[in-house]
Each structure stands twice: as structure tokens, then as C-alpha cells.
Amino acid sequence: MGYLRIFNPHPVKTGDGAQAEDLLLEVQLRDPVLQVEVGKFVSGTEMLHLAVLHSRKLCVYSVSGTLGNVEHGNQYQLKLMYEHNLQRTACNMTYGSFGGVKGRDLICIQSVDGMLMVFEQESYAFGRFLPGSLLPGPLAYSSRTDSFITVSSCRQVESYKYQVLAFATDADKRQETEQQKLGSGKRLVVDWALNIGEQALDICIVSFNQSTSSVFVLGERNFFCLKENGQIRFMKKLDCSPSCFLPYCSVSEGTVNTLIGNHKNMLHVYQDVTLKWATQLPHVPVAVRVGCFHDLKGVIVTLSDDGRLQCSYLGTDPSLFQAPKVESRELNYDELDVELKELQRIIKVVKSQGVWPMHEKEDDLNVSAMVSSNFDSVSQAADVEVGTDVVPSITVKITLQNRIVLPKVKLSIYVQPPLVLTCDQFTFEFLAPEMTSTVAFSVYLKRSYTPSDLEGNAVVSYSKPTGTPRVIQCKFRLPLKLICLPGQPSKTANHKLTIDTNKSPVSLLSLFPGFANQSDDDQVNVMGFRFLGGSQVTLLASKTSQRYRIQSEQFEDLWLITNELILRLQKYFEKQGIKDFACSFSGTMPLQEYFELIDHHFELRINGEKLEELLSERAVQFRAIQRRLLTRFKDKTPAPLQHLDVLLDGTYKQVIALADAVEENQGNLFQSFTRLKSATHLVILLIGLWQKLSADQIAILEAAFLPLQEDTQELGWEETVDAAISHLLKTCLSKSSKEQALNLSSQLNIPKDTSRLKKHITLLCDRLAKGGRLCLSNDAAAPQTMVMPGGCTPIPESDLEERSVEQDSPELFTNHKHLATETPVPEVSALQGVSE
């Protein structure tokens, strides 16, 4: 706004406002003020004058005062001594005794386009363009080396000698050729340069003794201390974005103190790189200085961007409060013993319940989910890739009801890919208690493969009035008909699975009422399913035995129908009032089919690494050819390209082809990981039915086999699962204390192949088959040694041991393509030509 103010602050009591007599002078200049400096700027005198930099003008003023009869009667005046009209828009300035002159200060102004203009008091000396200047940076003058130091747009600190600037060709006398318009008249040679890798906010040169001086540079994330020759003395990485800084003299010899203000209203005091003090400010400081006012030393003066000037000091006000003497009284040790026992009882109860209560009497927020029973009348599916099938969508409603005021509540919804949501993020403002908000969104299938689970999860995060963060989860299950259609039962299939139950078989029409093609009574024991995209699954129920068979051409497609069958059987018998219903699996564990999916997923990961490495090589080659071509084009004497343009075009096509291959491989890898998760869910389900594992043990298996929601090149499924299974084998499933003493590798790297992982999975099933049980307690390994029968295969410590284990131990899990050949379903003759 062009205001120039001079203050003389006085100490005031805490809480008092600013005093009117603190403002000595206030003048409104016609132009905005960029910078203010004080020095010997007027010829013929060594008195200090005030230099004010405007965008197109440099003005030098003298400040004089007239004493009055009383203190507030003193008058101060600002008198213009001279001014320079600038031909270029100014950015900043610095001053000093350039060239070693005595008794006067010269001024150097940096323009926005990178030109340095030097003024010898009332006269203009010369102007020089900095080479390669794009954006101006901070500027400072070092009197010891007689050089200007700035930070260029190349993010490097550069030093230019004053003598080099003075003897270079004058920028105003250059010939106005096109080439010289782009560069400088005579190329300036930089004295030294240091790449700091970031833009600088300020530069300060300090010299507290005659021997050495230091150059301090404040960057966007670090501050640097440099020697006179540009070498780094030390640097410090800052936690917050800085706004200003000030190096000043330290009481310790050989060290420098630095005040650094940041955008979190903090002021930090560093001694070299060590944080000595941190204090809170009421504003973000944009400038900071240390001064002495009225014999009060070490006053920190800060200025905010809205014009708030504050003088403060470090420390605390002394407290005059003295605690009164406590009257001595005799101690009753019997009462203290009773109180101690009561406190110990409370502590024991708190330890057993946990520090944080798991369940409160009444939740601050209630979350409920409701899935519509019918499809949307108009499908919300967009950009689907499911072939010719019509993709339906279904609406899910989430209702939130608060008990107290919650200003900001976030709702996030997640479903398993390739299921997608029309909207997955919502924000609520509950400004009054007992409010109810409902949001609706649609779910549909986007790709032509099946998801690994039909369960969705709604997560609500909010903060209580006390500031404690809370998270609430609400799960909902999507209907099978969203991704599946009625299909024709298949006579043959590569993969078959038999589930045994302890109750009479139930009609499939009553279990799956929406998936019957015909209502014929002969068709009640067989049913076909066709997933959107083409995969088919057949479900058969025995008329006499208590068995159900699921068969499909793809192993991973068995999971959803098998899980849906078990869930619907449990729900059916619960409605009948039968509580002892149970399922079991007595067939052969389908490890070979599972291992094939693991190998396919791992092969795609290896291909992805090779493609990315090849793409990186082609990109390096492409940039090298570009540099060669640019060098040829910049050369004053034209030279033949020597087919570099053809090589550049060919390399570009290779880069595009490799990028497309990487993208295609990533899509295949994502689809393979989804199929692998489906197969993993199926294997965990079969292990639980096979060994009748409890819910806690199944949860341990799920945590070990399904640790990742996403698969990346840095952390993949194979190495993570291998580490988790190895931990189980060396703890709760260990055979001896020797295995427990083995240390696992702390770093997870992609393995060379999947043989080790497959051996560990086989060994895990072996241990479970011989009586081992999963547990996470620390002393779980000791009783396992007694419970498990002898002959358990130990964990091999090396490849030689692994080979010997393979030779000594019999093959426990024979893998067949037809999984249920040993336990056929008798009398499945409801559909002629379909039963086995």
C-alpha cells in the first residue's frame, strides 16, 4: 500500500495494547515498497540514510527529528535526497562497499529478468545480465570476498565477483541482435556454484570474527551453511515449511545460532543443526530480527504478512506463587493398606479389560446398511467390459444417526474389484444431536471376471468432542444374482468339489429360488450358474446321501458358489430351529490347482519387472538420442544427423510399445491377483472344514494367506505369505525348540521362484493333519509338542534339508484334477447325462 512506518517500541505490561507514541513516523509513498535498507548512500557524508526500493524507482531519504517540549512532542521528517528511475522492473536489492571502497555504500538492484544494476550513490554505474537467468532469486553481498551471491532458477547457489561484473561488457551497449537478446553481452564466469536442489527463500552472510564468514541459505525444506568457497559447512532438514530466518552470534565459540520461523506459527532456535528452543507465535512471521530497545537486549522482532509487528523475548514470566506448608499428620497404615488393595484390584480389572474400552454403553454414531432386494430399474453400469451380457446394478443405502454433535464425519465404502461403486466417499455435518442422514449408491460388475468376495465394507471415521479419533465399520453382503445368471448344468468339468453335511439334503430350488431355469421336479437336485463374462458352475445335491458337489472349468470359480451354498444352508437350518448343522470336507486338498494359480501370478510379476527394466533402458536411450540431436541443432556449423532422427523415431515406437505392454501386464496381474484371492478363500474354507477349525483359527489362516489388499512390485503376495506361514511353522506349529530359535529375515524381497512357498504351504497342511493347532499366544509352542503325534516333518533350514525332507517324507497330499473321485456323490441321477 506504499506506507513507510518507523517505530520505537517501549516495554509494556502483559495484555496492554500498542502505545501511540511508539510510532515515530508514517508516510504514504506513491508506489508499493519492495525493500528497505539503511546505509551510507549519500556522497559527502558518512551519515546513515534510508533506501526504499519500488518496482520502478529507487529513492534515498534522510530521516531527521525535532525535539519538542515533551516526549510526544518530538517531530520526525522524511526528506528525499535523490531518486533513480529504473528502466526494468525491480525484484530486490543489496548494498555494501563494492570493490573495497571506503566511507560509502553502493547499491545493487536485481531486476525481474535477471539484470544486476549497480548505483554509486547518486549516479548509475553499470548493468549486467546474469547468464541463463529465468527467475530472480535472493541476493546478498559478501564484503570479504567482494562477490554477489544468489540462487538461480537452476536451483544452485552462484557467486559472481564484483570485478568480473565490472569489467564485463555493459548490458546497455550490446548490439540488439537476436542472439544477444537471449543471452548476456560478454559471458560472465561464475566464481563458484553449488546445487542445493530447491528454491531459496533468503540468503544471509554473517561474519562474527575476522577469520571466517559463512553463507546461510534458507531453502524450501532445508537450510544450508556454506563456506566462502561454496563448500557445505553443514545443512539441516526442516520439519515444517519455513517462512524466514536470521543467523546471529552464539555464546559458544565456533557455532552460529539461527532463528527460523515457519508456517505453523512456530519460531525455532538452532545452534548449528541442534534445536535449542521452540516457541509459539500468534502469527506466521515473514521477517525476523534481533534488536536492543531501551537497554533490553535480545528482543526478537517479528513481522507478519498482514502488518503485525511484535517484539518478544524467550523465556517465561516468573511465578510469585508459593505453595503453603502442608500440616503434618500421623499416617494410619491400616487405612493405607486397605486403600492400596482397593487400587490394586481396580488396576487388575483395568488390565483385564484393556486400557481403551472396546464397547461403550451407547455409541456416538450408529451406522446401518441396507441392500435393495431388486435391481435398479435403470442400470447405473458404465464403461463395463463384460461382453454381451446386460450388467445390472443394485442400490445400497447407508444410514447414519448421531447421538451427539459431530462436525465432520467421513464415510468410505469399499467392495472387492472388479465390483465398482458409483460413489465411494461421503462427508456429513451433524451440527445437532439425533440427526439422521442416508446416502445411496449403486454397485455393479465392471470386468469379465468374478470378485473374490461379495461382502462390502462401510467405514465411518470421526473425532469425538474430546478429540479422540473413532472408526466404525458396517459390513453388507451383495446378492449373488448381481454377478451371476441362471445357466445350463454341465455334464463334465475339470474341477470338482464335494461338501459333506450332517443333515438331509435340501432342495436346491428352495436354497436358490432365483436361479432355476425350469420348475420341473426332476431338476430340484441340480442347478447351473453362469457368471457375467462366461464362466459356468454346476451344483448337484445327492438324493440319498448328505453331500453336495460343486464343479467348474475354473478352479477359482468354485469359491463363490461353495461359500454361498454353505451360508444358505446355515441360514436354512437356523430358520428350521436346528442348531447342530455342520459341514465337513473329506476329499483331497486341491493344492496342485492352487499352486498353478500361484505360479501364473508369480510369472506375471516377473514379466512386469522385466518389462519395466526394458522400458527404463529404452527411456535412457531415448533421452541420450535427444541430447545428441539438440547438440547438433545448437551447433553453429550444421552437421549431418547420421540417421539419429531415424533412431529417435524407432526408439520412440519401442517406448510406446513397451509402455502398452507394461499397462497390459498390470491389468493381467490385477486380474490374476483377484483370481488368486478367490482360490485362497476356497483353500482356507476347505482347510477349516477338513480340520474343523474354530473361527479364531480360521482368522489366523486368513491373516496369513490374505495379508494384502493390493499387489505391488515392491511388496508382493508371495514373499508376504511365505513370511507369515514360516512364522506359523516356527511358532505354534513348530515341532521342537530348535525350530523356534530360527530367525526370519527382516527384509521381504521377491523370491527367485515359488518352490519354497509351495513347500511351506504343503508343510502347513501336513502339520495341521497331524494334530497341530493355530494359536497366537507366546507359550503356544510348548503344548504343541505334546499334542502333535510323532513323525512331524521339521522345518528345513537349508535347501539340502528341504531335499532330504522331500525324499524321506511320504506324499501326504495327492493332487488330482478330479478332486472328489475318492468320495463320489451316490445316486445323483436327477439330471440324465449330468451326474457322474
Image (cartoon, grey):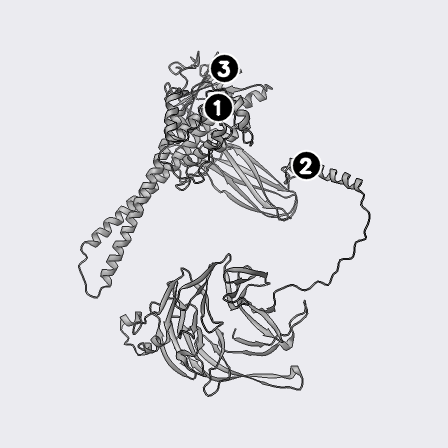
Give me the disc on residue 337. Answer: none
Circle 1 residue: 768
Which percent across, then down, holds residue 433?
Answer: 66, 45
Q: CA distance from mark 2 to mark 1?
A: 36 Å
Q: Are marks 2 and 3 in contact (CB under 8 Å)?
A: no
Judge by depth and name the residue closer to the eye, 247 or 116.
Answer: 247
Seen at 49% across and 31% down, the residue is 740
For label 1, count other residues whose C-alpha is less than 10 Å away and answer few (under 14), some (14-19) or many (20+): some
Whether residue 479 is visible to the viewer of this picture, yes or no, is no
Seen at 52% across and 59% down, the residue is 274
Q: How many marks?
A: 3
Please determine whether, in this image, residue 562 is positioned above or below residue 16: above
Judge by depth and name the residue closer to the eye, 798 or 815.
Answer: 798
Circle 3 residue: 546
Circle 2 residue: 348
Which of disc 3 and disc 1 is earlier in sequence? 3
Which percent across, then down, holds residue 203?
Answer: 45, 68
For label 3, count other residues whose C-alpha is less than 10 Å away and answer few (under 14), some (14-19) or many (20+): some
* Quarter that holds the C terminus: top left
Residue type, mark 3 in image: Gln
Which of disc 3 and disc 2 is earlier in sequence? 2
Seen at 64% across and 77% down, the residue is 21
